[in-house]
């Protein structure tokens, strides 16, 4: 829950409350008192008054930056949309400048990240179960709470603008409720609210869940994950804090096709972990022509390292296996939406190899083709089909295979904040059979001496080590390569410290990446 100023001159935001006249106090004191008293009676809430303006006397306009955040939250909660896909289009639709875009981004992501804690606070301030509130009203309240408790927005501006937003896009009716509830929220700061919520709690995971706004089952899963990958369980606080930090935009210049000149000219900085990468703390990367033409791509550096590790893994001579004269054959078994496929294809093109990108869903296969468009067409092919069938259809047909398996995404909660509230404990077990079947198919499809990279954007042991151990147990012709050493070899630092028992796990709080897991499995000759 990071701070972002939308009213005190901080770069990246400006005072929309002042721009929209803020709380209009002239001649409103008496009517404000009457309205506030009525609001307390209806909602049985009370809080110190910090503004004399009644909801009816405040702005009736929706500040564009807050409106964007509200529309993002409505799309996420009402349409199961993903914030990272909705937000850029809303920013462009409302013509936000760079500072307001930064404010809208922090308000959208911050309200989604903090939803668990904020809802627990709101439950103390509303006279009915939250599920009985109109969903739009609840989203407006979450936006107001984030401004009050986690952003450097003056309390009067946060309340005035949130009520104005509600009046403009929901209606005048809910404005008194929103006013009264947010006034009570403002009675305490965030730490005081957390102390109230955790008072009497003795379970460490419960306390952490309320403090750092994660479902309790995810806190427990991440604690288990740390231990499983050789880390100390006491790192859980740093990990949860990293999940709640605003993510940095990562770019990669496709090898041999793009460069970072434009990005660096626009304020990006050279990435410190992966070659050809750049970082930025804000802004819309879509404004870069190199991103629009596909030679630069937005991709987490952890994903970049995984793709580069597969390309660098040592193969053994194929023996009797046939090798096509144009070089190695690579396969991305679960290619959609195409980020890793694009980097792999660029690397393959440099080495005279070819890439087959497999994706079962036609609409996602279209995204893969779009992602690959910047790479010469003779390098890659897109196949629409079930990855579990490739092993039978093309046995021992590939030298290098990436299995970027469908997973819970617990490693990308900072980038996809809504995921923590959508995922359920049962998802882990439900995905397990698919992960194992895809890996088994890849092992059949790789030639003797070839390498399969099994990767997930999740550190959960049931999705990582357990899947790999099961695969190794079922066959005697497999061996684990030292994935940590290979990652070190392709990184700029050379000492990531991600390896553990020949697998590798990256972490947000240590490496500044998504929590990518990697195992490199070679088929014996």
Image (cartoon, rainbow, N blue to C red):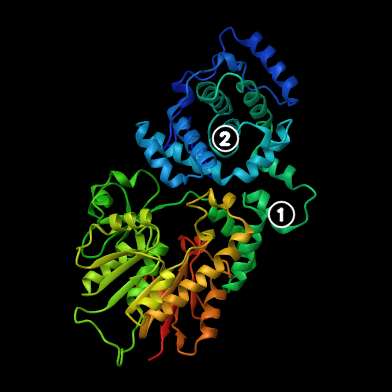
Q: Disc 1 designates what residue?
A: 206
Quarter of the image with the N terminus is: top right
Q: How many marks?
A: 2
Quarter of the image with the C terminus is: bottom left
Farthest residue in the top direction? 27
Q: Disc 2 designates what residue?
A: 139
Q: Are marks 2 and 1 in contact (CB under 8 Å)?
A: no
Mark toward the start of the polypeptide (2 vs 1): 2
Residue sitting at x 62%, y 56%:
424
In the structure shown, which secondary structural element does the residue marked by tag 1 occupy? helix
- Tell me where residue 477 appears, x and y as whole percent: 45, 89
Residue 210 vertical placement versus 35 (above, below): below
Closer-to-camera residue (468/394): 394
Residue sitting at x 70%, y 37%:
123
Of the two numbered discs 2 and 1 in the rendering, the one whose residue sits closer to the viewer: 2
Left or right placement of residue 362 versus residue 17 in this view: left
- Tell me where residue 43 appears, x and y as whole percent: 72, 25
| Residue 273 in view (yes/no) | no
In the structure shown, which secondary structural element does the residue marked by tag 2 occupy? helix
Closer-to-camera residue (463/215): 463
Q: Residues within 10 Å of mark 2 (few under 14, many from 20)?
A: many
Closer-to-camera residue (160/388): 388
- Tell me where residue 460 appears, x and y as whole percent: 57, 66
């Amino acid at each position: 829950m990071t701070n972002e100023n939308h009213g005190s001159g901080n770069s990246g935001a400006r005072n929309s409350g002042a721009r929209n006249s803020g709380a209009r106090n002239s001649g409103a004191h008496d009517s404000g008192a009457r309205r506030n008293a009525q609001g307390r009676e209806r909602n049985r809430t009370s809080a110190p008054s910090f503004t004399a303006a009644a909801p009816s006397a405040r702005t009736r306009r929706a500040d564009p930056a807050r409106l964007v955040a509200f529309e993002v939250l409505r799309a996420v909660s009402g349409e199961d949309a993903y914030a990272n896909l909705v937000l850029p289009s809303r920013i462009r639709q409302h013509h936000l400048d760079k500072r307001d875009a930064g404010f809208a981004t922090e308000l959208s992501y911050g309200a989604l990240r903090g939803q668990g804690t904020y809802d627990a606070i709101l439950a103390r301030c509303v006279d009915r179960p939250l599920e009985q509130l109109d969903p739009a009203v609840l989203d407006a309240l979450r936006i107001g709470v984030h401004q009050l408790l986690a952003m450097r927005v003056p309390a009067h501006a946060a309340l005035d603008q949130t009520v104005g937003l509600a009046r403009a896009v929901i209606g005048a009716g809910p404005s008194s409720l929103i006013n009264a509830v947010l006034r009570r929220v403002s009675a305490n700061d965030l730490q005081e609210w957390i102390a109230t919520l955790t008072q009497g709690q003795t379970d460490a995971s419960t306390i952490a869940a309320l403090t750092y706004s994660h479902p309790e089952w995810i806190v427990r899963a991440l604690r288990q994950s740390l231990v499983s990958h050789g880390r100390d369980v006491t790192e859980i606080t740093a990990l949860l804090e990293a999940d709640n930090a605003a993510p940095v935009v990562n770019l990669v210049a496709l090898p041999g096709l793009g460069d970072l000149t434009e990005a660096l000219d626009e304020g990006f900085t050279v990435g410190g972990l992966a070659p050809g990468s750049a970082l930025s703390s804000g802004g819309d990367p879509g404004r870069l022509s190199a991103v629009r033409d596909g030679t630069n791509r937005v991709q987490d550096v952890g994903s970049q390292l995984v793709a580069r590790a597969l390309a660098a893994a040592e193969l053994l001579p194929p023996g009797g296996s046939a090798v096509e004269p144009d070089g190695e054959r690579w396969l991305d078994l679960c290619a959609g939406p195409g980020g890793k496929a694009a980097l792999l294809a660029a690397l393959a093109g440099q080495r005279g190899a070819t890439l087959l990108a497999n994706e079962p869903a036609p609409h996602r296969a279209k995204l893969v083709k779009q992602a690959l468009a910047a790479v010469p067409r003779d390098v890659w092919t897109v196949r629409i089909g079930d990855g579990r069938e490739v092993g039978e259809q093309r046995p021992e047909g590939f030298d290098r295979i990436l299995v970027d398996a469908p997973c819970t995404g617990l490693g990308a909660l900072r980038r996809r904040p809504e995921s923590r509230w959508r995922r359920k404990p049962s998802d882990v077990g439900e995905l397990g059979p698919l992960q194992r079947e895809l890996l088994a198919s890849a092992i059949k499809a790789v030639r003797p001496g070839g390498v399969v990279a099994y990767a997930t954007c999740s550190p959960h042991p049931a999705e990582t080590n357990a899947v790999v151990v099961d695969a190794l147990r079922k066959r005697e012709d497999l061996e684990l390569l030292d994935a940590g050493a290979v990652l070190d070899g392709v990184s700029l630092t050379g000492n990531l410290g991600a390896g553990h028992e020949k697998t590798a796990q990256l972490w947000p709080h240590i490496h500044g990446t998504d929590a990518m897991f990697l195992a490199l499995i070679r088929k014996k000759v």
